[in-house]
Image (spheres, coloured by chain):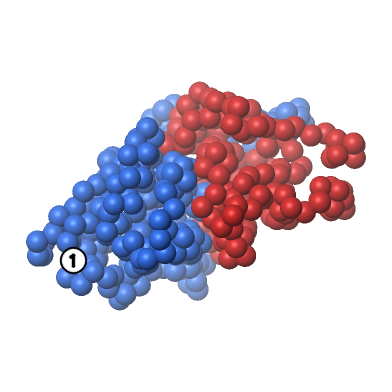
Chain colours: A blue, B red
Amino acid sequence: MKLTVFNGSPKGKKGNTQTLLDHFLSGFLSGGNHTCETFYLNEINGHEVNAINFSRAEHILMAMPLYHDSMPAVVKAFIEMLPSPSSHDVQGDIFFIIQSGFPEANHSRYLERYFKKLATRISRRYLGTIVKGGCNDISHRSDWMAKKIFKSLYGLGKFYGNGGSLDQKILHQLAQPETLKGVTLLFLKTGIKLGFMRSQFDRMLKKNRAYERRFDKPFLDSKEHKVSSKQEHS
Amino acid sequence: MLKNSHHQVTVFTLRELDLKYCIGCFGCWVKTPGLCVISDESSLVCRAYINSDLVIFASPIIMGFTSALLKKVHDKLLPLLHPYLDIVQNEFHHAARYDRYPSFGLLLKKGKDTDDEDLEIISAIYRRNAINLRTSLLFVKLMEDSPERIVYEINSL
């Protein structure tokens, strides 16, 4: 089987999306006589050519980060270039990967719904969407730290290679937590109030000598607001 | 018509603006807090946005969603939020940078292939956007609706 991959990350090969893809694809390529080809949607000038590659492909995987509850703008621009299918016959199949920084899968479910509809629109069989939250720095995480996630993606890839579908059990496990609940929610609420979970950004802010300016509100017009923002600083 | 109703209105024709894509570099959070590091005209939009009471996003529906051009603007509103995390409606969201955010409404032009499910999907995503941007989606209107009626409804908000 030949799988055609469209990586929709604005960061291209250097992002978290690519890391997830690498593990999925190594599972996929591990069995049988499979091949894959990846196209990058962050090269805006390539949309036209990529759209042709898209309509010619039988099996398609589109992967991307969640940007403001939907696809990155550059991915939407690509979708707008897709030719409408010449007939209503099924043109092949398609599945998706949506990864987000927030840990809960729920954030990505709305885009998932859009993709399910998109598949119908372009006359492709919809195989499902791999949703994974908590991916904010996964491209920098060691194999050991992200072992479970990488293993699941490898498993999904292998399963897909064997039967051309997504393993529903792994799909479900990978998406956890779907929402925040109970003790976890309480713990996180308290943690946030106490100012935990800021260290990653604080480290970057300090490195860039921007820490003191982290609460800046540069776009406020009224003087009143500017005073209140200054008070917050002190 | 809105101007005649004693509102102060700023209109951006997005295709005439120099807008670059957000590449998720987080520079607006960790390098120049509150400002995009890529120089383009999205700062004009951000300034007008945060100083408004109501923002109307108007777009044709293309392939079941608002235009890539409008999505570009949404992605570039990131500087208006803060990198720190917060829990809103029992979910993770980024913290607010500003004390108040405008409400927003959606004005859509149906495409030939637009159906009710598309409108539902778009509205659901914009309601999610509203949670992110500490506000609510006040209305979703179609260009097919009469402008008088839309203005009347805005005036009644």
Residue type at mark 1? Gly
Measuring from the top left, give residue A158's x and y in whole percent: 18, 66
Q: Residue furthest front?
A: A87
Measuring from the top left, give residue B116's x and y in whole percent: 62, 65
Q: How many marks?
A: 1
Q: Residue furthest right?
A: B5
Q: Chain of mark 1?
A: A
Measuring from the top left, give residue A80's x and y in whole percent: 47, 46
Residue at 90%, 36% (x, y): give it. Answer: B4
Dot 1, crowdedness within 10 Å: few (<14), some or many (≥20)?
many
Relative horizontal placement of residue A159, taking residue A88 as reference (left or right): left
The answer to which image quadrant residue B70 occupies is top right
Residue at 54%, 55% (x, y): give it. Answer: B64
For this rendering, which residue is in front, B21 or A182? B21
**On the image, numbered disc 1 is attached to which residue?**
A161
From what the image shows, is residue B1 above or below residue B107?
above
Residue at 42%, 64% (x, y): give it. Answer: A88
From what the image shows, is residue A151 above or below residue A229?
below
Measuring from the top left, give residue B129's x and y in whole percent: 59, 52
Residue at 28%, 44% (x, y): give it. Answer: A39
Q: Is residue A39 visible?
A: yes
Q: Residue furthest bottom?
A: A169
Relative horizontal placement of residue A147, taking residue A49 as reference (left or right): left
- Dot 1: element: helix
For this rendering, which residue is in front, A39 or B55? A39
Q: Is residue A214 visible?
A: no
The answer to which image quadrant residue A159 occupies is bottom left
